[in-house]
Amino acid sequence: LRDFLLVYNRMTELCFRHCVCNLNYRLLTGREESCLDSCAARLVRANHRLMGAYVGLVPALLQRRAAEHGAQAGPSGLPASPEPAPGPAES
């Protein structure tokens, strides 16, 4: 939710700065409104494309992490330790 709100706020600020040039009126002009609509639509489409690519990459990233973790684990599935575990001191 936090990431969504950050993206939404950035998109709003970017489109507002790009499209709204006259702050003397309470309502948007027709040109400003159409600019905001097209700006928001472009950014939403770009965000959808990026999220689609991200969703496509996540399984490969998870498999690679699992393979790396499996390579670090010993035969019992526990992490392999290069040094023996400390035990009682021998006399």
Image (cartoon, grey):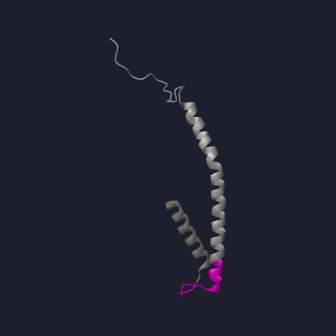
Per the rendered image, the range of residues in magenta is 22-35
The answer to whether 84 appears left or right of 44 in the picture is: left
Locate residue 33, reporting x and y percent. 62, 81
Which of the 4 quarters of the picture holds residue 49? Answer: bottom right
Is residue 50 placed above or below 22 in the rendered structure? above
Is residue 75 placed above or below 49 in the rendered structure? above
Identify the residue at image location x=56%, y=72%: 12
Locate residue 32, reporting x and y percent. 62, 81
Which of the 4 quarters of the picture holds residue 40? Answer: bottom right
Q: Is residue 44 magenta?
A: no
Locate residue 53, reporting x and y percent. 66, 54
Q: Nearer the viewer, residue 69 or 25?
A: 69
Identify the residue at image location x=49%, y=25%: 82
Is residue 26 placed above or below 18 in the rendered structure? below
Locate residue 15, reporting x and y percent. 60, 73
On-image quarter of the C terminus: top left
| Count of picture labels | 0
Q: Nearer the viewer, residue 39 or 51?
A: 51
Identify the residue at image location x=66%, y=63%: 46
Extreme residue in the top direction: 91
Extreme residue in the bottom direction: 25
Is residue 56 placed above or below 81 in the rendered structure? below
